[in-house]
Amino acid sequence: MKILIAEDTLSDRMLLRFHLAKLGHQVSEVQNGEELVNTLKDSYYDWDLLIVDLNMPIKSGEEAAREIRALQTDSPEDWIPIIFLSGSGTDEDIQRCIEAGADDYLIKPIQHKVLAAKLLAMARIANMRNRLVSMNKRLEALSTTDYLTELPNRRAFEISLTDEMAKAARYEQALSVAVLDIDHFKRINDEYGHDVGDEVLRQVSARLKSSLRKGDVIGRIGGEEFGLCLSHTSAEDAVNACERYRKAISGAPIICGEHKLNLTVSLGVTAYCDNLGQLELIKLADKALYEAKAKGRNRTIY
Ligand code: GH3
Ligand code: MG
Ligand code: MG
């Protein structure tokens, strides 16, 4: 573990450093609560554990612990275990320090076997915290990613769109939205089977992703339907961008095993204006898409 010690007494500091280094930990030291808080403000995520003396000049361990706990959010990622050390161990001291944010309290002189055991216990909890953090990240990714195509799913797309609409309204920036739908996709499934249909969806998604302009967001919002959120983009520029996406699909056949499939897509575009809600915006893009289908497909309609 990377351990930061806050202790004003030189001999205590040296002894602690010696024992912790022997246990294989990386140790740094500060001499009072003020230095401890300042160090954490600069390098919060560098530390796995804090060992803090209660009575120190300038700022006590208790005050420092309160300030450190105020720096963190309630995300499990932000929790750093704090062990207090003190020559005095009254019930009130222990109670106050735990209330200030300490996780454990040891009375000097330190019994080094006890300290080693406490570190082991803290490392176990920190380990569990790390697993929780990485599990949360995985769940977050799963709940926002479409399983088949690995594009943002409808939920994630709508969250991005909501953000972009708010920015467009606040900073009076242009924003356009498009819906892209594969033409006659049902025929692919009917003719070649569902597995080939799935592979086509993956390849179409990969092509769209690799044609993505910086700042654009694309998501799979339906079976063979994709949403495009084009920030800083006027309707006219959006039509040009959509034409590039359209040609990215129709420009070269999609190869699925022995099949060479010539696919086209249709797109409907709409521009955001202040009083439009998200549902209305997608509905307008859908209407334009419907028109593109009615006019013969393989085109972009604004
Ligand atoms: P249009 O040009 O009017 O859009 O015709 P279309 O055939 O593309 O549209 P339609 O809505 O009639 O059919 C869409 C098809 O997409 C039907 C559905 O089975 C298929 N589909 C939806 N999701 C998936 C999927 O995840 N995998 C596969 N293989 N097919 C899917
Ligand atoms: Mg379709
Ligand atoms: Mg469709």
Image: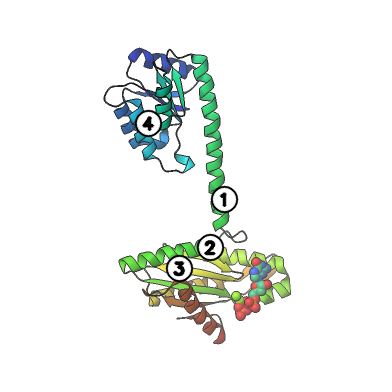
Image depth: mark 2 or mark 3 in front:
2
Look at mark 2 in the image and give the residue it sits on. 155
Q: Amino acid at mark 4?
A: Ala
The percent coordinates of residue 245 (x first, y second) are 50, 71
Q: Is residue 185 visible?
A: no
Q: Amino acid at mark 2?
A: Arg
- Near mark 4 (Cα within 10 A), the count class, few <14, some 14-19 or many ≥20, is many
- Near mark 3 (Cα within 10 A), the count class, few <14, some 14-19 or many ≥20, is many
**Label 4 – label 2 distance at C-alpha:** 40 Å
Q: Residue furthest left?
A: 58
Image depth: mark 4 or mark 1 in front:
4
Mark nearer the N terminus (2 vs 3)? 2
Position of 213 with respect to 185 (left or right) is left
**Label 4 – label 1 distance at C-alpha:** 32 Å
**Label 3 – label 1 distance at C-alpha:** 24 Å
Q: Quadrant of residue 249?
A: bottom right
Mark nearer the N terminus (4 vs 2)? 4
Question: CB of residue at label 1: within 8 Å of ligand 1?
Answer: no
Mark carried by residue 139: 1
Mark nearer the N terminus (3 vs 4)? 4
- Near mark 1 (Cα within 10 A), the count class, few <14, some 14-19 or many ≥20, is few
The percent coordinates of residue 275 (x first, y second) are 38, 75
Look at mark 4 in the image and give the residue it sits on. 65
Q: Nearer the viewer, residue 218 or 75?
A: 75
Look at mark 3 in the image and give the residue it sits on. 229
Q: Mark 4 and mark 1 in contact? Answer it, CB < 8 Å.
A: no
- Near mark 2 (Cα within 10 A), the count class, few <14, some 14-19 or many ≥20, is some
Mark nearer the N terminus (3 vs 1)? 1
Q: Secondary structure at mark 1?
A: helix
Q: Residue at coordinates 47% horizontally, 40% vertically from top-left?
A: 77
Image depth: mark 4 or mark 2 in front:
4
Question: CB of residue at label 3: within 8 Å of ligand 3?
Answer: no
